[in-house]
Image (tube, grey):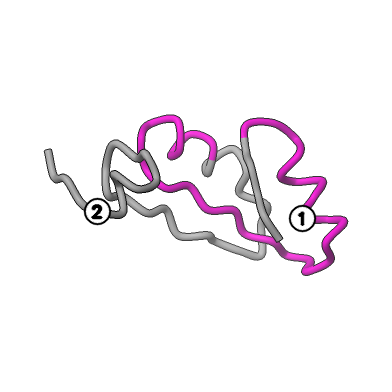
Amino acid sequence: MIKTEICEMLGAKYPIIQAPMGPYDTKELAIAVTNAGGFGMVSHPEPSAEHIRNVVSGGGLNGSF
């Protein structure tokens, strides 16, 4: 298994980053990647803070703005 400083710092099992693929909400894919030990990312078709908050608060994700 590859060990990297960023994985250790963020508590990830694998140094795999899932690219946010828009213009779609990719919450389910991001949750699956994160649960598998990688870095899940969410794409946001609408840049408003309210939209992003709704996507992130829908379960399984934490976000910072």
User: Where is residue 53 drawn, in percent x and y?
Assistant: 80, 50
The reply, left or right, for residue 63 in relation to residue 29 is right
Residue drawn at x 16%, y 45% is: 3
Residue drawn at x 84%, y 66% is: 48
Q: Amino acid at mark 2?
A: Glu
Vertical comparison of 45 with 53: above or below = below
- 22 or 30: nearer the viewer: 30
Residue drawn at x 64%, y 42% is: 62
User: Where is residue 42 drawn, in percent x and y?
Assistant: 59, 53
Residue under label 1: 52
Instruction: Verify whether residue 33 appears in magenta.
Output: yes
The reply, left or right, for residue 33 in relation to residue 63 is left
- 47 or 7: nearer the viewer: 7
Q: Amino acid at mark 1?
A: Ile
Residue under label 2: 5
The reply, left or right, for residue 62 in relation to residue 19 is right
The reply, left or right, for residue 23 in relation to residue 31 is right
Instruction: Verify whether residue 18 appears in magenta.
Output: no
Question: Label 2: few (<14), some or many (≥20) within 10 Å?
Answer: few
Point out the frontmost of discs 2 and 1.
Answer: 2
Mark closer to the chain start, 2 or 1: 2
Q: Secondary structure at mark 2?
A: helix
Q: Quadrant of the N terminus?
A: top left
User: Where is residue 32 drawn, in percent x and y?
Assistant: 48, 34
Q: Quadrant of the C terminus?
A: bottom right
Q: Which residues are magenta?
A: 31-60
